[in-house]
Image (cartoon, rainbow, N blue to C red):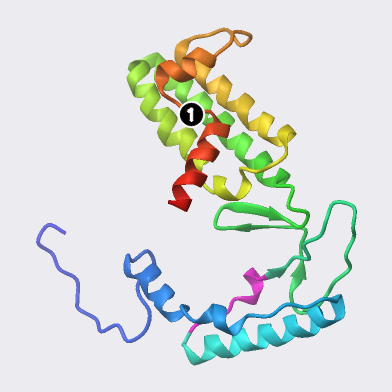
């Protein structure tokens, strides 16, 4: 910085936090991890035994590759249907959770995605507020840029995973999106915004889910 150079240090292990090499090197180190954790079982008892075995294999794998398994950030979830309760504690050393956040997406044991939609709707509501303020000082073009940056970016993230949610939860997201669109074009909250989607060339959350999912299959 300003022709001032820091001292050179030899890095023997790992990379600085935030380095662009981090993800690439992590993938190289964990590339064969799935081969260590394969198997299916038909009973809870077998599952508990296998899960404990797989955790020990994972610990050994990490030790062999100079990786650290953070048990404080590791949880166990017993996925189940809405009407079935499963009491499973295969790994007493790990906390049992009904929900957990993974790469910004909240996963729940019953796979309803409701906790994630709750979080998403709060973020979308905050995004609409910012869009409204930007519209007042920067005009439609600037506000539209803000929409894609602060609103649709949240819609797109992980939509392949949660996009197939129930109609009730999907409607909640669509309502938030309609509010943002009405804000952009200055419509009353009871006015239809169907044509506004076409005018702004913005996909509804349903269309966006279909588009992204098809893109992933090509």
Q: Nearer the viewer, residue 146 or 216?
A: 216
Name the secondary structure under disc 1. Answer: loop
In screen coordinates, is 121 left or right of 29?
A: right
Q: What range of the chain is rendered magenta?
A: 67-74
Magenta span has 49?
A: no
Residue 181 is situated, as x and y percent measured from the top left of the image, at 51, 20
| Outermost residue to the left | 3
Magenta span has 70?
A: yes
Residue beneath the point at 51% across and 36% down: 208
Residue beneath the point at 50% across and 92% down: 64
Q: Which residue is mark 1?
A: 203
Residue beneath the point at 48% across and 29% down: 203
- Position of 83 relative to 32 (above/below): above
- Position of 105 relative to 42 (above/below): above
Q: Quadrant of the N terminus?
A: bottom left
In screen coordinates, is 157 left or right of 165?
A: left
User: Is any atom of residue 209 visible in this view?
Assistant: yes
Residue 177 is situated, as x and y percent measured from the top left of the image, at 56, 26
Q: Residues within 10 Å of mark 1 (few under 14, many from 20)?
A: some
In screen coordinates, is 202 left or right of 36?
A: left
Residue 11 is situated, as x and y percent measured from the top left of the image, at 30, 82
- Position of 139 relative to 1 (above/below): above
Q: Nearer the viewer, residue 51 or 74?
A: 51
Residue beneath the point at 47% across and 88% down: 65
- Position of 84 relative to 63 (above/below): above
Q: Nearer the viewer, residue 69 or 113?
A: 113
Q: Nearer the viewer, residue 121 or 177?
A: 177
Residue 73 is situated, as x and y percent measured from the top left of the image, at 63, 69
| Outermost residue to the front | 218
User: Is any atom of residue 68 visible in this view?
Assistant: no
Q: Decide whether the magenta segment is chiefly helix, strand or loop.
A: loop
């Amino acid at each position: 910085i300003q022709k001032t150079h820091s001292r050179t240090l030899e890095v023997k292990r790992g990379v600085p936090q935030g380095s662009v090499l981090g993800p690439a090197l992590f993938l190289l180190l964990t590339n064969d991890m799935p081969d260590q954790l394969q198997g299916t079982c038909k009973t809870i008892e077998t599952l508990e035994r296998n899960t404990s075995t797989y955790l020990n294999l994972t610990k050994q794998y990490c030790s062999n590759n100079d990786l650290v398994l953070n048990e404080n950030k590791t949880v166990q979830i017993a996925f189940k249907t809405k009407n079935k309760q499963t009491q499973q504690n295969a790994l007493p050393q790990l906390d049992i959770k009904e929900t957990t956040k993974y790469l910004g997406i909240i996963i729940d044991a019953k796979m309803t995605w409701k906790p994630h939609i709750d979080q998403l709707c709060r973020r979308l509501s905050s995004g609409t507020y910012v869009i409204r303020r930007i519209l007042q000082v920067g005009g439609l073009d600037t506000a539209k840029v803000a929409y894609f940056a602060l609103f649709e970016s949240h819609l797109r993230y992980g939509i392949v995973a949660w996009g197939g949610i129930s109609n009730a939860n999907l409607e909640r997201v669509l309502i938030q999106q309609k509010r943002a669109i009405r804000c952009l074009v200055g419509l009353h909250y009871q006015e239809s915004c169907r044509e506004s989607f076409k005018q702004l060339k913005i996909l509804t959350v349903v269309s966006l889910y279909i588009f992204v999912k098809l893109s992933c299959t090509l």
